[in-house]
Image: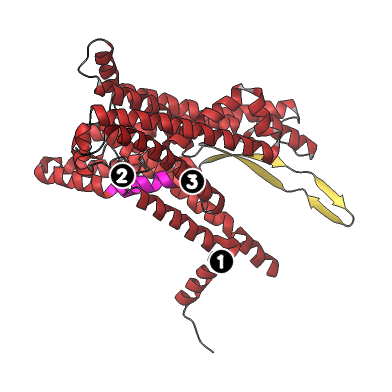
Amino acid sequence: MQQYTPNQQNLQAMLANLNIAGLKNKIIFTLAMILIFRLCAQLPLFGIDTHNFANLAATNNLIGFLDMFSGGALGNVSIIALGIGPYITSSIIMQLLAVVIPQLEQLQKEEGEAGRRKISQYTRIFTIVIAAMQAIVFVIYLLKTARGAIMPDVNIISFAIGSVIIMTAGSAFTMWMAELMTERGIGNGASMLIFCGIISKIPFYAGKTAELVSKNSSLQPGLLLLLLIFFATMIFIVIMQEAARKVIIVNPRRQVGNKVYGGTNTFIPFKLNPGGVMPIIFAIAILLFPTTIIDLVGRANAGSIGIGKLIVIISNALQPSGFLYNAIYFLLIVALTFFYASIIPNLQPKEIATNLKKYGSSIPGIKPGKPTAEALDKILSKTTFIGAFGLGIVALIPSAACSVTHITTLHGIGATSLIIMVGVALDFINQVRTNLLPKNYESFLKQ
């Protein structure tokens, strides 16, 4: 009989666990979708000179910031240059409309799976519309500001029409991949694609930083301080993502036949940051949609007087490293964290209070019904307030540190990118654990 070392046994146990609930297939499927996404990001539009575009866009901070979240797809002017942005923007619009339009709210809350499918269909339609608008704006930018990036022998009319169609189709394809990853893979598909885009740009920013520091040795202490701040920020992000206020629930004992059920205390966890990375992603999408149009159209008309110059002033004020941008960004994160907490189904105080009363459970010292709902609402408001402001402050610290240390090459990998990377990584780990739960229950039952 073959003997295995403890390390070999652990490896075999890990491989066996991967097969539980199709976890291995989900991971392989997710990696395959990411590979396809990365390959598409390297396929430029017909008639584009990517080298010339990179030189022209090097002075545009907004283009660089957008390129960070598209994983280089925008910088390559690829067929999926718009990335997952239109889909995220469309999701925000639908969630906001569901709050103010009763019919959409009814679809979301009362009609179950059929209602959610209808809302998903509306989201896809909005995605196509938004993608077409963004594609048109980007083509205008190419024709008026980055004309040197278009090869001289290309027919302009065919290029413009073809580019708008291809980029819109590319955005729809990216949306389809994201939904497939969410359904059949591990983690949220849109977040995973953004995560991969950020990771893919880290070597580029690291190279630029190394070049900057090698030319100016006085920046070395500042770089060390900046890296320490980034590391401390990542630790704080993990704490923010995992921290929760636990509300004790007393469950009554119930006798069914000769067996007694319940009687043990449980708890309801109210997370400090119930929305995870979604408030950050939504805040970026809300900010970048108007600022992208203002920047691209405004710079295309920079030579004109009046409105053209005003647009350029607004565009410069809303650059990702500017004060006004960061102030609006902070307020959006706070507002969207509260908004996201208010629409999460399992965080509705009235529904929780109703369910507790229905099963005879209660919070110690608080009467069932309305008093319980009011108490839960206060707890949720306090925890969300702490989480929202904490998330907003954390989102600004690394960017401020970049300005103080004069290491401007790492502005792209600021707190926004760190929060998304850490948040998506934690979500991925938690989903892996969730998929492994059947194995744990199976082992428990066999004992």
How far apart, in angstroms, are the residues tagged by discs 1 and 2?
34 Å
- Label 1 sits on a secondary structure element that is loop
Q: How crowded is mark 1: few (under 14 residues within 10 Å), some or many (20 or more)?
A: some
Q: Give the range drawn in magenta.
A: 193-202
**Residue 30 drawn at (x, y percent):** 47, 55
User: Looking at the picture, which amino acid does disc 3 mark?
Assistant: Ala
Q: Is mark 2 on a helix, strand or loop?
A: loop
Which residue type does callout 1 highlight?
Answer: Asn
Query: Which mark, residue 178?
Result: 3
Camera-side mark, 1 or 2: 2
Residue 163 at least partly seen: yes
Among numbered discs 2 and 3, the one appearing first in the sequence: 2
Marked residue nearer the N-terminal end (3 or 1) = 1
Is 213 on the left or on the right of 297, as rendered? left
How many neighbours does mark 2 have within 10 angstroms: few (below 14), some (14-19), or many (20 or more)?
Answer: many
Q: Is mark 3 on a helix, strand or loop?
A: helix
Residue 406: say if magenta: no
Q: Where is residue 110 in the image (x, y as percent from the top left)?
A: 71, 33
- Which is more toward the observer, 45 or 420? 45
Quadrant where the image shows the C terminus: bottom right
Q: Residue at position x 24%, y 38% from top?
A: 154
Q: From the image, which quarter does the N terminus lie in?
A: bottom right
Q: Which of 64 and 231 is in front in this view?
A: 64
Q: Which mark lies nearer to you, 3 or 1?
A: 3
Is 51 above or below relative to 429?
above
Kindly give the residue lying farthest to the top in the view shown: 306
Is 263 displayed left or right of 158 in the figure? Answer: right
How far separated are the C-alphas under marks 3 and 1?
23 Å
Give the residue pinned by disc 2.
Answer: 72
> Is most of the magenta stretch helix, strand or loop?
helix
Q: Where is residue 382 in the image (x, y as percent from the top left)?
A: 55, 28
The numbered dot on residue 19 is 1
